[in-house]
Structure formats: C-alpha cells, structure tokens
Image (cartoon, helix red, strand yellow):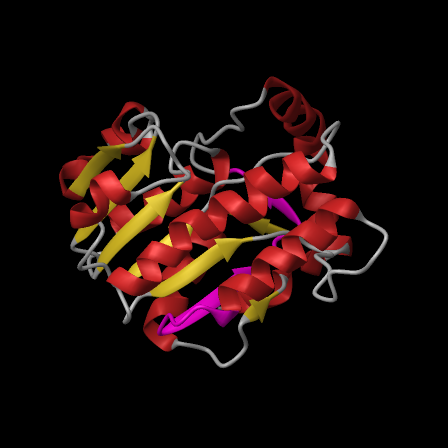
Amino acid sequence: MNILIFGATGMVGQGVLRECLLDPGVTKVVAIGRSPARDTPMGRLPQAAKLEDLIHGDLFDYAAVADRLTGFDACFFCLGVSSAGMSEPDYTRLTHDLTLAAAGPLARLNPQMVFTYVSGRSTDSTEAGPSMWARVKGRTENALLRLPFKAAYMFRPGAIEPLHGIKPKSRVYRAAYILLMPFMPLVKKLWPESLTTTEQVGKAMIAAVRKLPEKRVLEVADINAL
C-alpha cells in the first residue's frame, strides 16, 4: 500500500504518519507539505526508511508535481486551521478551497484512491446552520464525497489525545493540552464517545482503506471501533 499524507508535521498528521510507518502492509509513505516530516520525531523512527518528503510550497496548485502524485492507494488529508478570529471567506479558502485544490487532481490521477479527510465533530452537512466553521467543513465534506474516488471517508474526531510524544504545533493548543491531560482518564470513563487518540485515528484510517466500510462519515465511536 502506497500512502500520501498532507499535514504530516501536525499533531494528527504525526499520529497518522507513525501508524503508517509501523504498519508492515504500508510500502511507501509520501508526506507532502512545506516542511519535511523527516524532521519530526516520527520521521526519525527506524521504519522511516519508507518515508519520502515531497516539499511543495503552493498548496493551491499541484501542476508542477503532478507526475509525483500518481500510484497511490490512499491519501490521508490531515491539514487544518482554527476558525478563531477568521472571516468566513478566509476560512473557506484555507479549508474548503485548499482541500479541494488537492483532492480534485488526486481523484483524476488516482481513480482507485481512498481519500480520508480529517473534519470535526458537529460538522454541518446541511451547510446551512448557524456555526460558520461547521458550515464550511460540511461544504468541504460534501464536495469530497462527490469526487470520483474509489471511496472517501470523513473523519469527525472530537477531543484527540496525543500519544507517543506527539505534541500540538500551536503554543495555545499545547498549553491547553497540558492543562487537560490530567482529566483525560475521567473523560474516557464518563464520555468515551467524545475522545479518541492519535494512534486510534491513524489505525482507523489504514483500516478504512483495507475494509472499505459502507458508512462514509465517521464519528468518534466509528473511528474507535474501526
């Protein structure tokens, strides 16, 4: 299995990268982005020999690297930005437009690809609700589900517990996780369907490629079960 990962240097992406590198059924992993995944702790694992970095600065145009985007069985799209303080047009550009700029060419170049998108809990599939970020995420999900991939899966994790030394890139999120970590056992006990881990997300993405579940929009409980 050959896998392409977007956002492999972020918290979720590092978790996904780790599971891909550790999985013996994954032959090659290509991490595409502005900075090398090999510089992260996951990129220094012994299994990282099968990791390739594809450094690409313009995440809205892939014409220059189209010849390197073929032959993939799956794409795990883990890029994302916070909507805090952003206008809807700006958030749309960095969420919907950026994602579709990659997914469109990939669907043409890899018709047998399974595409997995990290969305968010409470995403609005109607695209008409009061929450701006949820509307934009819903619009993005719906557009991806219409593309001619072999299959596309929308992952909607709630809280994600980082494992194996993985840390959020943002200082704000890093501080928040430090404060919340002592409460994780209580959250797991009282609200198990609100929490997953970076390891579970990564393993679930790989399992989706192998099992091709019928359900295409996966909530926390679905992710953990998968």
Query: Outermost residue, top direction?
Result: 171
Q: Is residue 100 visible?
A: yes
| Residue pictured at 28% horizontal, 70% vertical | 111
Pick whichever, 2 or 149, lies toward us. Answer: 149
**Position above or below: 190 against 10:** below
Quarter placement of the N terminus: bottom left
Q: Position of residue 7 (x, y in %)?
A: 42, 38
Q: Is residue 156 visible?
A: no
- Residue 60 in the figure: left or right of residue 180: left
| Residue pictured at 37% horizontal, 70% vertical | 149
Q: Check if residue 217 falls in the magenta segment.
A: no
| Residue pictured at 60% horizontal, 18% vertical | 171
Number of disc labels: 0
| Residue pictured at 29% horizontal, 27% vertical | 36
**Position above or below: 49 against 19:** above
Q: Position of residue 223 (x, y in %)?
A: 54, 63
Q: Position of residue 178 (x, y in %)?
A: 65, 24
Query: Outermost residue, bottom direction?
Result: 214
- Residue 161 in the figure: left or right of residue 179: left
- Residue 204 in the figure: left or right of residue 30: right
**Position above or below: 27 against 10:** below
Q: Position of residue 79 (x, y in %)?
A: 48, 41
Q: Check if residue 161 falls in the magenta segment.
A: yes
Q: Which residues are magenta?
A: 146-162
Displayed quadrant of residue 49: top left
Pick whichever, 3 or 149, lies toward us. Answer: 149
- Residue 21 in the figure: left or right of residue 161: left
